[in-house]
Amino acid sequence: MNKIWILAKRELSTFFDSLTAYIILVAFLGLSGLFTWIYGADIFMRNQADLQVFFNIAYWTLFFFIPAITMRTLAEENKSGTIELLLTKAVTDWQVVAGKFLACLLLVIIALALTLPYYITVWKLGPVDHGAVWAGYLGLILMAATYSSIGIYTSSITNNQIVAFLLALLIGVFFHVIFEFLGSNFTGTIGGIFNYLSLGTHFESISRGVIDSKDLVYFFSLIFLGLVLAETSLSKRNLAD
Amino acid sequence: MDIILENLTKKYGYQKAVDNISFHVKTGEVLGFLGPNGAGKTTTMKILAGLLAPNEGDARIGNFSVKENPDEIKRVIGYLPENNPLYLEMPVIDYLDFSASIQGMPKEKIGGRIREMIRICGLNAEKHKKIGELSKGYRQRVGLAQAMIHDPQVLILDEPTTGLDPNQIVEIRRLIKELGKEKTVILSTHILPEVEATCDRILIISKGKIVADGTSENLRKQSQGRELLRIRIEDGERNEIIRQLQQLDQVGLVDPVRGIDSCYEVQSRSKFSNRRAIFQLCVKNNWILTEMTPVETKLEDLFRDLTIN
């Protein structure tokens, strides 16, 4: 665990050193702030003291931003060869993957923490369902974790950051939109399967404030799958074929 | 810790990059790994560093096998990869701190150790700069510093002196020699004088196979086994001198040096020395011997002989 934290800390400081972190934070807060408070079907049109609008916006902004955060994690190391150095240190492949994952997730959590003033503002405006707000944040974090693990996997299989980014979006779009669309077009078991695979279904049920173990299982298995795949592609170099 | 390679083979596809290599490096030995490009040096070192798995055979460091205990091996080795990849956006001092803590060094020792490495590698003026801002030579020093920071028992250095200036090369060679007294060091290089200057033992590989193994003097003798002298004899008739020299028992081959009068290259027969005989011959005939220089076989020639076929 200690090693994972050391790796995550280094990764996180790289985000801040290379300006990536600031750009992501500013863009995320700017976009979600704009659509939550100022533009379109914003929070005032809704006439209800909750953060549903923000959660819906963040659901999309994070979808695009997370691949941008994860794309360099392993692809850059593959390209510059630093991965060789890292893997010959006293760390396991799993710790490397977990450290990267933790760093990406922490950056997202920092971004979300910076939106807590929204919560406080709404709270001042009217009676807020606190449980629903926290559940919404939990939903966003789980979603971020899922896309981070997918992004780290796509970053592990290439040495090109753009490829990693696009591939992560491509895989993400299935969970984000396509499965939901298919689910609503099919009936019966097939429709049920697609509905279950759709990330939106689970996100909605959590952000409504219902934390069901079924949804947690869904998120955790996707996170785990992504990380295991990433680890497998790291240790592929070691296969004596 | 000893390094033992046993019948190590690594294939890339159908090509054997390393072909059934076995050798043993003892503690306190500096092994120079020589070979032309693509001979399998880097592959062998990567296997030792736990980066690649061998197809056949095994490599052991101390009691640990690269196959069964890769995690233990990573703790006792320091590895400098070929192109010295580093995190360019990190400041030198942060990077060394990261390298030390990731190797599991206790926190209270890290500070002192970093200062020591910065002093040894001459990084003091650059320690707060980002690695990306450093010149190639300084990056190489950072690479060496990170390999040695956790005081490993075994050092695997893939071309450690590339990009260094001559002063620094001398420094680093001295450092490696110093380290090599207690530790086990394997270094690869293209620079032949470097091997002679730093290494106790030389291993030449070509096309994945070991073609020579021994100290530099041993290798020279082994390849030639003959003594080569350049002599200058004055006051004698050229053909007569050559004829008489050739009649000596110990002398194998006499070659007049072109362009310079009265100068000859004399090769002895295997395992003989012909200096005394030549001197006595000159005395007998009243020739004046004005020069007698042993010509050393150069490591370069040996290297060419062994690796070009």
Image (cartoon, coloured by chain):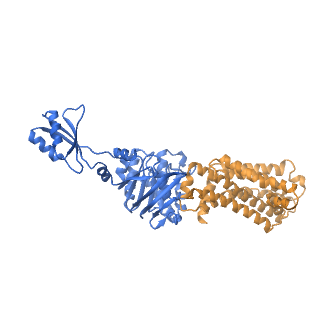
Chain colours: A orange, B blue
Q: Is residue A114 left or right of residue B262?
A: right
Name the residue: 64% across, 54% down: A156
Residue that extends furthest to the top in the rendered view of this protein: B259
- Tell me where residue B125 appears, x and y as whole percent: 47, 49
Q: Is residue B241 left or right of residue B30?
A: left
Q: Quadrant of residue A199?
A: bottom right
Residue B254 lies, with reference to residue B12, above or below; the image says above
Instruction: Report x, y in % for residue A45.
Output: 90, 52
Label total for image: 0
* Residue drawn 82% across the image and 52% down it: A36
The N terminus of chain A appears in which quarter of the rendering?
Answer: bottom right
Q: Position of residue A195 (x, y in %)?
A: 83, 59
Q: In which image quadrant can residue B236 be found? A: top left
Q: Is residue B33 left or right of residue A85?
A: left
Across and down, in percent, residue A127 comes to 87, 63
Viewer-closest of A41 and B263: B263
B172 vs A158, nearest the viewer = A158
The answer, for residue B125, to whether it is visible in the render is no
Identify which residue is drawn at 73% across, 59% down. A146
Residue at point 37% right, 59% down?
A: B29
Above or below, comparing residue B65 to residue A76 in the picture: below
